[in-house]
Amino acid sequence: MAGAKFYPIYMKLKERIKNGEYEEMLPTESVLTQEFNTSRNTIRRAILMLKEEGLVYSVKGRGVLILETIADDRWDFDAGGFNGLEAIEQANQMETETKVLCLKKIIIDEKLQGKVPFTTGEILYQVERLRILNGDPLMLDISYFRFDQVPILTKSIAEKSIYQYLKDQDVHIAAAKRRFLVTKADEKDMEYLDLGTNNCVGVMENLVFNDMGRLFEYTQSRFVPDRFSLTYFAQNADL
């Protein structure tokens, strides 16, 4: 997405909003079109990203209003997006690192079949990645990919962005189902995550489907609960 024409415009507008250069409203589409020497459609796509992030909203007959900023020192995680760690990094202007703890092919046995949405005998990639944010180990991703639904995965790919790799290989992500819960920290959580005084972890379960409607990924993102704010932005359609 970073290579898209509208993306640098989105980033510039977001920076201006964060810095208070815009007070109550964004400039009109006409003004932005002239400033960035681009089309209205490109400006609209940049503004749509701002809306999806909950920074602005549109009111018929008035324009694009800027939402009041609320101070919160937790990392902001967009619960409705697909960009994972990249989205957290961009939204919070932080340094991130990924350590691949495990990447191997496995065959689902009866014990694992009860824990993941795949059937006994299926071949999967199992990928475990520790996410380090500003030097702190705060998220543990445990992922399973159907071997016959994705290209070959390697450690170097997993250290970067598996989703970007899949996109480059023409694997199209169509939809995801997500569930959020809090559960008791297990031995692996306590070994790798900086839990502090917490004895539990937040969990985002993610089932991801390709454009043929096939489930190809199941991921548990296990994170330090008091260090993240899961967000989803909704706008009143009547405005």
Image (cartoon, helix red, strand yellow):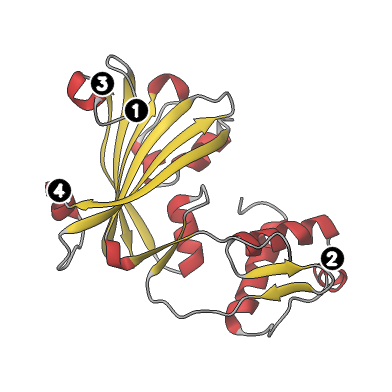
Q: Position of residue 69 (x, y in %)?
A: 54, 79
x, y (%) of residue 225?
Answer: 28, 62
Q: For marks 3 and 1, give the one nearer the viewer.
A: 1
Q: Measuring from the top left, give residue 197's x and y in whole percent.
A: 14, 68
Instruction: Label 4, secondary structure: give it.
Output: loop
Query: In this image, 35 relative to 106: left or right?
Result: right
Q: Mark 4 or mark 2: name the one nearer the start of the chain.
A: 2
Asked which quadrant contains residue 103, the reply is top left
The amino acid type of the residue labelled 4 equals Asp
Nearer the N terminus, badge 2 or badge 1? Answer: 2
Q: Which residue is mark 4?
A: 186
Q: Are marks 1 and 4 in contact (CB under 8 Å)?
A: no
Judged from the image, the secondary structure of the residue bearing numbered disc 1 is: loop
Check disc 3 and report the residue beneath it.
108
- Say what amino acid the circle numbered 3 marks: Ile
Residue under circle 1?
117
**Can see residue 39?**
no
177 up-or-down from 94: above or below: above
Q: In the rendered view, does 41 fall on the left or right side of 73?
A: right
Rounded to the nearest whole Å, what is the CA distance between mark 1 and mark 4?
Answer: 20 Å
The residue pinned by badge 2 equals 37
